[in-house]
Each structure stands twice: as C-alpha cells, then as structure tokens.
Image (cartoon, rainbow, N blue to C red):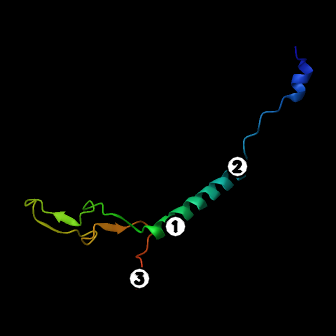
Amino acid sequence: MIPAALILATARPAPHPPSLAVVLLWAVVIAAALGAAYSVSIRRHPYRPCRKCGESGKHRGTMFTRSFRACTRCGGTGCELRPFAKEPEPRS
C-alpha cells in the first residue's frame, strides 16, 4: 500500500483559470488571423453568386415566365462582389 504522505507530496494543485488579459490576447490573435485569411480569400475570389437571380443573370417575368431581362443586381453576369471586395483591375 502507498503511504498517504507520498500521495500528498506528488499531488499537484488544481490549475488556475487563465486571466482576462490572456483570454483577450488570444481573442485578438484569433481575430487577426481570421481577418488575414478573409483578406487573402477576397483577393483571390472577389465574386460570389448573385443572390437575386441565382447565378443565371436573368430576371424572369411574373406573368410571362418565359420572358426575361438582365438582372438589375448583377447586370446579367450572374455574380456580384463579396463584402469588402474591390473591383479587380483588368489585366492587359
């Protein structure tokens, strides 16, 4: 049998919860990492499918469903800019 003094000598105290400063520091680091990842994602893929026309570029008529016109939101392209994205410069 193991003596109680040996058990008490090797026992570790309960860990303390992290301080508020450590939690806030980690929150800032994680937010900065997510912001950097979103920034890279926007530069590589600035467009998303248009939510109004469903990526078709067509706005269907209400009464005459076979008739259509260009979508007013995306201009008939079927895609729109993502939030915080800039219009890409044309390549020459």
Q: Secondary structure at mark 1?
A: helix
Q: Residue at x 71, y 52 (%)?
A: 21
Q: Quadrant of residue 49?
A: bottom left
Which-is-in-front pick, marks 1 and 3? 3
Disc 3 crowd rating (10 Å Cα; few below 14, some 14-19, many 20+) is: few
The residue that mark 1 highlights is: 40
The location of residue 39, given as percent across then percent down, is: 51, 67
Q: Secondary structure at mark 2?
A: helix
Q: Earlier in the sequence, mark 1 or mark 3?
A: 1
Q: Secondary structure at mark 3?
A: loop
Type of amino acid under label 1: Val
Disc 2 crowd rating (10 Å Cα; few below 14, some 14-19, many 20+) is: few
The residue that mark 2 highlights is: 20
The location of residue 35, given as percent across then percent down, is: 55, 62
Type of amino acid under label 3: Arg
Q: Residue furthest top?
A: 1
The location of residue 92, given as percent across then percent down, is: 40, 86
The residue that mark 3 highlights is: 91
The location of residue 10, given as percent across then percent down, is: 87, 29
Q: Earlier in the sequence, mark 1 or mark 2?
A: 2
